[in-house]
Amino acid sequence: MEYLRRIDFRREGKTLLRDYLLLFAGTWLIAVAFDAFFLPYHIAPGGVTGIATVLASFLPLSVGVISFLINVPLFLYGARSISWRFVVRSFIAMSLLSFFLDTMPVYDATGDILLAALFGSAVEGIGLGMVVRGGATTGGTDMAAQILHTKLPFLSVGAFCMLLDTSVVISASAVFGIQSALWSALAVAAASVCMDKIIRGFNTAMQFLIVTDAPENIFRRIHRELDRGCTRLYGEGTFSGRDTGILICVVSRVEAPRLRKIIAEEDGKAFVTLSDVNKAMGEGFEGIASGT
């Protein structure tokens, strides 16, 4: 009972609603990518849906049905080693994707295979990223890769994903020709970039690690001119043996040049490293509760 009292059901409900909206919208976008861009040109961009695209060319079954039939045993096997919540959400996402694939009409939205490969992979990548941010997967090769990794642990899950997607592209070349395989390979790469961007988010920032003899002057100007905070550490130079100040500060990309100028003006001999931050959460950035 004490555990239930600590649960914020209103916030949990909003999170659940957002996650399932992401699953719905993400699977719909993936289906659009296939029905409007990939299928008219026989582009099979990896994954179980890519396998289904190849198999549907000579089996009397639709892409959606074949995808579902391949995914079900993968889920049944993989469900033993992953959380039930992830399994339920992923099964819903897989079912929605199969439904959308078969109920939406297949049509050529571009009239050009290059545009179809580029825009299709962008739409697919956005959809896949939304599904992942919704706490699920559409099944497919990532589930198969996890299963294979448990049997052959000397290869990573990522390596198995790459091998499986490569096998799909090779299969596409055998069925549809080498040009189809090349377009499929391009689509796999472009979709991966788009998916990664959606998963990581767009509020990228930069982290400064500043080793300086003038930490007070620098952080006071950071407070005053950038309205940012920073973390102060105390260090010791291994060559000089002297005490030195260390500041860690995360700023937006727009603010980064201003911070570099502040450091240069206050301590021209400071040692500074800059790192890309994929997502920043907390005061001054996106709230932690709203981040996924």
Image (cartoon, rainbow, N blue to C red):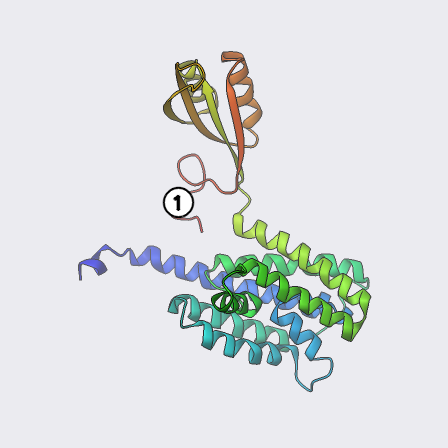
Would you place residue 37 above or below residue 101 in this image? Answer: above
Comparing 237 with 248, the one in front is: 237
Residue at figure coordinates x 52%, y 68% from the top left:
148
Give the percent coordinates (x, y) of residue 22.
50, 60
Comparing 243 with 137, the one in front is: 243
Residue 107 showing in the rendered view: no
Quadrant in which residue 260 is drawn: top right
Give the percent coordinates (x, y) of residue 140.
56, 69
Q: Residues within 10 Å of mark 1 (few under 14, many from 20)?
A: few
Quadrant where the N terminus sits is bottom left
Residue 217 showing in the rendered view: yes
Give the percent coordinates (x, y) of residue 115.
77, 58
Quadrant in which residue 8 is drawn: bottom left
Comparing 166 with 56, the one in front is: 166
Q: From the viewer's perspective, is 81 left or right of 144?
A: left
Residue at figure coordinates x 63%, y 78% from the top left:
102
SS class, disc 1: loop
Comparing 194 with 188, the one in front is: 188
Residue at figure coordinates x 58%, y 59% from the top left:
159
Q: Residue furthest left?
A: 1
Q: From the viewer's perspective, is 58 left or right of 144?
A: right
Quadrant in which residue 86 is drawn: bottom left
Count of numbered tags: 1
Q: Which residue is mark 1?
A: 288
Question: What's the amino acid at mark 1?
Answer: Ile
Give the percent coordinates (x, y) of residue 147.
50, 69
Q: Residue furthest bottom?
A: 60
Would you place residue 135 above or below residue 261 in this image? Answer: below
Q: From the viewer's perspective, is 203 left or right of 33?
A: left
